Amino acid sequence: MKVYKGIGVSPGIAIGKVYVYSHKYVNARPEKISSVKAELKKFEAALKTSKRQIKKLSAKISRHLKKEDSKIIAIQMHFLEDEVFVEKVTRAINGGKSAVESVREVLQEYEEMLLKSEDEYFKDRSLDIKDVGYRIISNILGIKNELEFIDKDVILVANDLTPSDTALLDKSKVLGIVTDSGGLTSHTAILARALGIPAIIGLKDFSLNVREGDEVIIDSENATVILNPDDTTKAYYLGKKQEYEDRKKEILALKDIKAITRDGVSVTIDANIGAPEEVTKAIEYGAEGIGLFRTEFLYINRFELPSEEEQFEAYSYVVKAMKGKPVVIRTFDIGGDKDFPYLGLKKESNPYLGMRGLRFSLANIPMFITQLKAILRASAYGPVSILFPMVSDVKEVIKSKDILQQVKDELIQERRDFDKDVKIGIMIEVPSTALTVENFIGIADFFSIGTNDLTQYTLAVDRSNENVADYYIPLHPSVIKLIGMVQEVAKKNGKKLSLCGELAAFKEGIPVLLKQGIRVYSMSPASIPEVKKYIREITLEGKNIPDGFHQGEVDGGL
Ligand code: PEP
Ligand code: MG
């Protein structure tokens, strides 16, 4: 038995067998060949396995995912059966190259040919080719650990999980998550909280110390991971797990109560979601609205951009499900830790300070227009607002609003229904924007404070780097000061203000934020009942006072 300490990012206790995930196969180098015959055999076997996997994936996808994805799967299958491809690889192997090298070479040839095409559709197909290529190569190398094929309950252990890794993962099979990298507000942390999966991250080299089949206990409250526990420890944690689950049920029963402090300050609690399906969780946990729909996750783990129609379906699904409750849709926040291989983006040495959020949208206007059009169309089905991420300059907002106006004009011409008065908000997550927020009063209808980024940019601490996790302090006086400044300007000018960073659900943070005047919070759905309960137990000063002192509903701020 060995005990490891990390950062507990999603509450709960999980006990289970380990599944170690790595990205080895993507970077696999061609190796020396044994004999032509052996290499040919490896290639044939890998083709067969790939076909079997794609068939399995296709069955899974047709049950759970969209038409577009099924189409991509069909294209990949077609490629695996393509005689010309098989012939070319066979010829390369016969010429003395290894199976891996031969597949890589032929794929590159196909990719280059497709990329040269004038037709966008064919250009996009190069990504399918790349994907199917990785699959064949990983099968030649005998590496099978692919997240999409986890078929029993496991504790997922990885060096890191990218957003694309987690998108295809069958989340119902994951009891807990442990990663070597990551910080409190990294993508893995947010995702684990959204799904209510216990998670501990930042364990440095844990993934190198475990093997498939090892048993692990995750105790998020104590930020502890226990490897191969003895019987006494396991029995103790089984009891603790049951206690935790009973408490969770009790709290869930409180989901529909209003969040009012003991001295009568009423607070609105909205949900953050990253996929249309998460709206079900938001409703289930008592969200009063969707305060943040992170749309960039629609762009992940695909081989091409989602069409306007597909986006419209996703956005309107959420709007309809919320039945008249407000939905804030954030335009894509691409960049930072969210990588999209098919966009062919250049690697940046400082991605958090680079082409991210609204900057990216303004550099990719056709993509931006498609998204704005889809969001506007969804606004015909209920109250929708649009939120721009990573705003760092007034000019960006003005330009974005001009583009939005063009899109509105187009929709009018097309006689499409939409909310002509759709409200526009900006994320306050860059310190310079917080410091000059009065400059945005005339151009934004509302503000949403993103403390995840505001903290990293104010303190110069990478939010997903476990080595500097101790420096990442969302309640640092400088961050709180900035929040207070934004609140003051918003209040003075009658602007709506909310806070949607992870700090919104941290117990230590809530009293501080209440005191700063924040009255609207948006958080992962699973946190909502507990936060409501907590707010009802405290006063505006964060003090606990005995039961029976609860005053009526008095609105304490904006
Ligand atoms: C934030 O930065 O606080 C935020 C809510 O946005 P994201 O976590 O998606 O960067
Ligand atoms: Mg952010």
Image (cartoon, grey):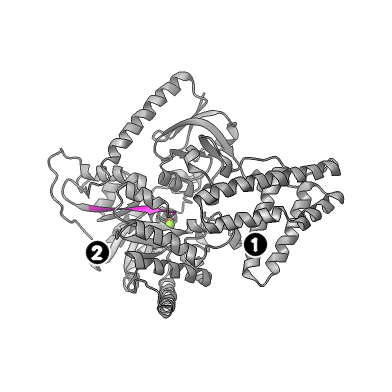
Looking at the rendered structure, the kind of residue marked 1 is Arg
> What residue is disc 2 on?
491
> Circle 2 sits in a helix, a strand or a loop, which is it?
helix
Q: Kindly identify the residue that appears in the image at 70 percent across and 61 percent down.
A: 111
Indicate which quadrant contains ligand 1. bottom left
Mark 2 → mark 1, Cα distance in angstroms: 50 Å
- Residue 478 visible to an observer of this rendering: no
Q: Earlier in the sequence, mark 2 or mark 1?
A: 1
Q: Magenta segment range?
A: 267-275
Q: Is residue 126 magenta?
A: no
Q: Kindly identify the residue that appears in the image at 49 percent across and 67 percent down.
A: 308
- Residue 531 visible to an observer of this rendering: yes
Categorize mark 1 by other alpha carbons within 10 Å: few (<14), some (14-19), many (20+). Answer: many
Q: Quick check: 27 left or right of 259?
A: right
Looking at the rendered structure, the kind of residue marked 2 is Lys
Q: Kindly identify the residue that appears in the image at 39 percent across and 38 percent down.
A: 11
Q: Where residue 358 sits: x, y (%)? A: 46, 66
Q: Where residue 150 sits: x, y (%)? A: 56, 39
Q: Quick check: 55 left or right of 513?
A: right
